[in-house]
Image: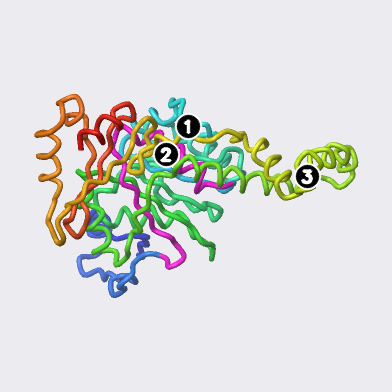
Amino acid sequence: MLLFSATIPDWVKDIAQEHMKQDFQVVDLAQDLTRRTARSIAHLAIDCPFPERLEALSKVLHCYGGNGRIIVFTSTKADANSLLLSDKITHDVEAMHGDIAQNQREVTMKRFREGKFQVLVATDVASRGLDIPEVELVIQLDPPRDTESYIHRSGRTARAGRAGTCITFYNDRSAAEIDKIEEVAGITLDRVGIPSDEDMIKANTKGILKKLLDVEPEVLPMFEDTAELLINQHHGDASKALQIALAFCSGHYKMANPDESLLTGRHQMVTIKMISNEEGGHLGAQACYAILYKYWAPRISDDVTVMRPFADGTGAVFDIRSQWVDGFLDNY
């Protein structure tokens, strides 16, 4: 008897002991590898507070998803269901988890393979054995509890010689799990920020360029007079006229909200950098909090829930509400 598994956690070995002779042999093709995931996978990690996950996920889907298939892994069935019902997610989404009947799972998988919808939300229970070569992006709303699960999940992309991306959300409570995954799997997860409004605009522009390829030459003469009029309005600057047309087509023809956190992407928040004014001076997160509580009112200091210290210990960055920025800086 031969048993095959993409990963070999303890529960797989238990199954082997139950069904095979006691002197069975284990052949692990990955045990001696320093990097235990496909080299064609780009591993990214996003520091995102729990309450901001769905809004951040919406931005990630737009900026990284493109037109390819996407799998979003959740830790629980409740998380999967809440994602389906969220008004922040505008993509076509369907789910697979343990409460969904097997025949419905098969229908969902068939529709996903055929490209009838773009985003599949799955729990680990429902995701074992998924083999869909066209998956370009895997997103994990939480780091998995063990590295084997990370290897398995990330392996849903970059199949059949293709490249792929795996993005994992984490927060202060789960940061240590990211470190563990990097150590055990022999990989480095590049820390990236939540996509900004500017990133969203650029992503939408790429989508427009792909759609422009579908324009048939026969319809172009109908727009010739309008194109010439637009160019003339801008003193013959065809490049500027085209930029204006693209901006309007993208839906982003007015400046985006400048008050957007660089840490979490939240609107009406401004990221503040606090540094030591002494050369070589140390100013860690605790010291920054102490300064906030000493010199600012509780409505400001108590509202600072996300703070990230600099690696060299010279200061930290944190968010405050945009309506408090002017007073905050004056007091500083």
Tag 3: residue type? His
Q: CA distance from mark 3 to mark 2?
A: 42 Å
Answer above or below: position of 242 versus 36: above
Residue matched to label 3: 235
* Location of residue 196 by image quarter: top left
Where residue 147 appears, x then y in whole percent? 27, 56
Nearer the observer, disc 3 or disc 2? Answer: 3
Q: CA distance from mark 1 to mark 3?
A: 42 Å
**Magenta-drawn stretch contains 294:** no
Tag 2: residue type? Leu
Residue matched to label 2: 57
Front residue of 34/226: it is: 226
Graded by Cα atoms within 10 Å as few (under 14), some (14 to 19) or many (20 or more), the crowding at tag 1 reads some
Which residues, given as a range, are shown in magenta? 38-66
**Point 68% across, 40% down: residue:** 244
Q: CA distance from mark 2 to mark 1?
A: 8 Å
Asked whether the beta carbons under mark 2 and mark 1 sit within 8 Å of each other, the answer is: yes
Where residue 36 appears, x then y in whole percent? 34, 67
Tag 1: residue type? Ile
Instruction: Tell me the element at label 1.
Output: loop
**Point 20% across, 50% down: residue:** 275
**Point 39% across, 44% down: residue:** 194
Left or right: residue 162 versus residue 215 is left
* Location of residue 229 by image quarter: top right
Where residue 228 appears, x then y in whole percent? 85, 42
**Magenta-drawn stretch contains 58:** yes
Mark seen at residue 89: 1
Q: Residue furthest front?
A: 330
Answer above or below: position of 130 versus 292: below
- Which sits earlier in the primary sequence, circle 1 or circle 3? 1
